[in-house]
Amino acid sequence: MKIENKVVYEYIEEYIRKVQPKLDIELEAVRAQAEESHVPIIKPEVASLIHTLLAIKKPKRILEIGTAVGFSANLMCKYLVSDGEIITIERNADMYKKALENIKKLKTENKIKVIFGDAIEEMTKISGKFDVIFIDAAKGHYDTFYNDSLLLLAEEGMIIADNVLYKGLVACEKDEIVRRHKTIHKRMRSFIDMIMNNPEFESTLIPVGDGIIISKKIG
Ligand SMILES: C[S@@+](CC[C@H](N)C(=O)[O-])C[C@H]1O[C@@H](n2cnc3c(N)ncnc32)[C@H](O)[C@@H]1O
């Protein structure tokens, strides 16, 4: 099994990108710089899906696990209600610094608070509830992030998890997976089973980007 396999065909992705609305100039600059520095950020199709979900949801509080350089946090800002906030967690010091720089550049300091630290620890210290929790960090820990998210999610809240198919690898059967990917395959599958089978949520797994799960708590 080659993990270069992709979830969506390139020509389809290219077409979708052409018809999508353009990002604001400042945000496009953050995206371009991330791409140039090989920082993994959400793909344009995922960005577009998140925009639409947030436009429907109109959240007051968003929690993000995995800030990187602050691209998705700045993207999500647009659909917060006027006094809303995003709390985002990043454990890599260089990313954290760059995220703060970008937040300053885009003048979103009053909306985005970046916590420097490991989300596994930091999530247990956060108080209050969130309308949306976006999981986009180390894939091997999605189950832990998910269990902690359940404690922090507001009634009728929504959990969004990116990269759940890991280039299609997760959809392959166990015996097709090479040894070095077996742990990630097992862990991601167990996370997917857990989230998709939680009876308190309506959940869907969509083959967009690298695979995304949207899970909405039923009130
Ligand atoms: C895919 S990138 C996030 C991209 C970002 N959400 C965006 O689209 O603009 C994943 C980030 O999560 C961070 N990360 C991974 N595991 C983490 C953890 N346990 N706690 C905090 N940050 C973590 C990595 O350092 C990396 O910067």
Image (cartoon, rainbow, N blue to C red):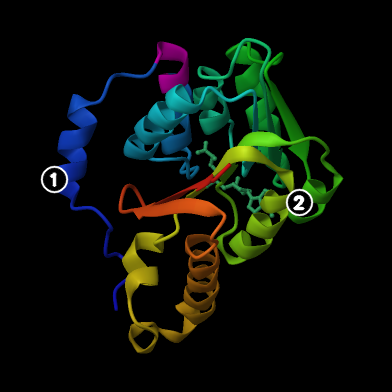
- Please tell me which residue lies in front, 51 or 18: 51
Q: Locate the N terminus and report the quarter of the image it occupies.
A: bottom left
Query: Where residue 13 sits: x, y (%)?
Result: 21, 42
Q: For the view shown, which residue lies furthest in the front direction?
A: 219
Q: Amino acid at mark 2?
A: Asp
Q: Locate the C terminus and report the quarter of the image it occupies.
A: top right
- Residue under numbered circle 1: 11
* On screen, residue 83 above or below 172: above
- Please tell me which residue lies in front, 103 or 46: 46
Residue displayed at 82% across by 50% down: 124
- Residue under numbered circle 2: 118
Q: Looking at the image, can residue 32 be seen?
A: no
Q: Viewed as shown, does residue 108 lie left or right of 139? A: right
Label 2 Cα crowd, 10 Å radius (few <14 / some 14-19 / many 20+)? some
Q: Amino acid at mark 1?
A: Tyr
Q: Viewed as shown, does residue 5 lie left or right of 195? A: left
Q: For the view shown, which residue lies furthest in the right direction?
A: 125
State which quadrant residue 141 falls in: bottom right
- Please tell me which residue lies in front, 213 or 103: 213
State which quadrant residue 32 falls in: top left
Query: Where residue 110 sits: x, y (%)?
Result: 71, 13
Q: Which residues are magenta?
A: 24-28
